[in-house]
Image (cartoon, grey):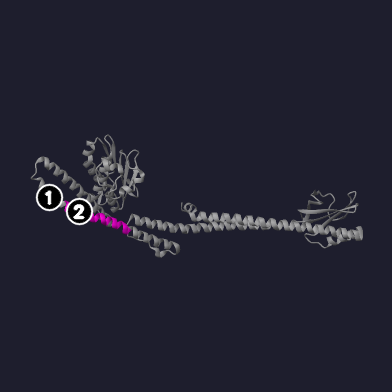
Amino acid sequence: MKLRKVLASLTFRYIAKYLLVLSMAVFLLVIGLYMFFSYGYFRDLGASLVDEEDTLQLIYRGQGLPGLNQYVEDQRANWHVDRFHYLVIDADGNKLLGDLPEDTAYRDFDDGWGGFELALLEWGREVDVDFLARRIDLETQYHVIVARNYRDAVEKGRLVLATLFRTMLVTVLLGLLGGVFAAARSLERVDWLSGEMARIVRGDPSQRLDASREKGQVRELAQIMNQMLGQMEALMQGVRSVSDNIAHDLRTPLSRLRNQLSQLRAGLPDDAAADVDQLIGECDALLASFNAVLRISTLEAGSRYSGGGELDLGEVLQDVVELYEPLAQEKEIDLQLQWLPSAVCRGEADLLFQMFANVLDNAIKYTPAGGTVGVRLEAVEGQGSRVTISDTGPGISSEHWEDVFRRFYRVEPSRSAQPGHGLGLSMAEAIAHYHGGNVDLKDNRPGLRVVISLP
């Protein structure tokens, strides 16, 4: 799996593409050079045959056939690999002299040029060799064929091409192997950065990346990310401090106002007392919101829960369901509970109760009459417990799933449809993070599923 990840990485793909383009460029360059030198070789070979033709005509005009015979014999005696080969025949086709057989099958080209293949002995075995030939006429009674083989050039060309091919193959393999190691190293650094960032996001935002173990651009990137984390933490703390200060500063005068309204109500008639009761209810709702904001800030600012007490999540959920059963029956909602007696968790019972209550309250609030709300508890091997609270209400579109966990955020249609302050899911997420868990939203088709995972 790791090898597949390395091969799919951007670094390895870039190196592989570079090797492919480089190999193709080198291959085309080699082919071009081979064609250029081959053209030069055969051009020189043809020129040497033309020169030899002029020499034979000159010798024949000066010394006749005996002189031509002596020249051919001298050339045969001075043996070397790419020497000239001759055949002299008369007008009737009879061989007069030379070392080429008269029954050779020639391939005639243009302007007296030709070619043939001849089997020569080499170290006791026959080897087929290609020749380039030139046919000339000595007056009208003799015909001469002068030829020269180009076997040496062909063999050298094949040797060079085979060597280059093997070299390119080895180079590509070594380059790919180096690309794997380079990509693995690069991926290791990226995984380290991703893991550290995930750890900071899931844990304490005040933590920073340890850039001392890295060098070069990775270290510079880690330092820049630390600066970004510092700025984000400062902005988050500024926003939280504003809401916390507002909640803290307004809670005292609001409590004083509520007490004064309670004292004022005692001396009022029943019709006026009903209006005062409504005002007292509004004060209680505002005080509950301020207390929730301060509680969320306390949970977010503190460390994770490290207590040793274990509690049964099934019992906590059963208490929450029993509390909301009358409300569900009043709205004609089918409230279902499934739990496992062995699902345990370390945590504070009152906080977990409040978390489940907030989520279940939202589910019942937004589920229409005749709908269904399900509460399911299951134990996930090696991961802890998972609580799923689902409903058949209108749900929340996926583009708002991250926003609903922000304080005071509410999806636009719910602002006028249902009362609330947009703190329920924020409180649930803060409590889950405090216990080392998390809260996720899923589409229930229809409705919404809130999945709470606890270690």
The secondary structure type at the circle numbered 2 is helix
Q: Is residue 380 left or right of residue 285?
A: right
**Which label sits on residue 250?**
2
Q: Is residue 188 left or right of residue 83?
A: left
Q: Residue at x 10, y 40 (%)?
A: 270
Question: Horizontal and vertical percent for residue 192?
Answer: 41, 58
Which residue is identified by label 1? Answer: 260
Specify the principal SS of the magenta part. helix
The secondary structure type at the circle numbered 1 is helix
Return the residue nearer the eye: 198 or 316: 198
| Boundaries of the magenta span | 233-254
Q: Quadrant of residue 195?
A: bottom left
**Which label sits on residue 184?**
none
Q: Mark 1: which amino acid?
A: Gln
Magenta includes 246? yes
Question: Horizontal and vertical percent for residue 243?
Answer: 25, 54
Sort mark 1 into few (<14), some (14-19) or many (20+) by Cα contacts within 10 Å. few
Residue 306 in sight from this viewpoint: no
Q: Mark 2: which amino acid?
A: Leu
Question: Horizontal and vertical percent for residue 87?
Answer: 85, 54
Distance from the alpha carbon under mark 1 to that under mark 2: 15 Å
Sort mark 2 into few (<14), some (14-19) or many (20+) by Cα contacts within 10 Å. some
- Residue furthest to the front in view is 272
Q: Residue at x 44, y 59 (%)?
A: 189
Residue 176 in sight from this viewpoint: yes
Magenta includes 308? no
Q: Earlier in the sequence, mark 1 or mark 2?
A: 2
Say if 378 sits above or below 121 in the image.
Answer: above
Q: Is residue 361 left or right of residue 193?
A: left
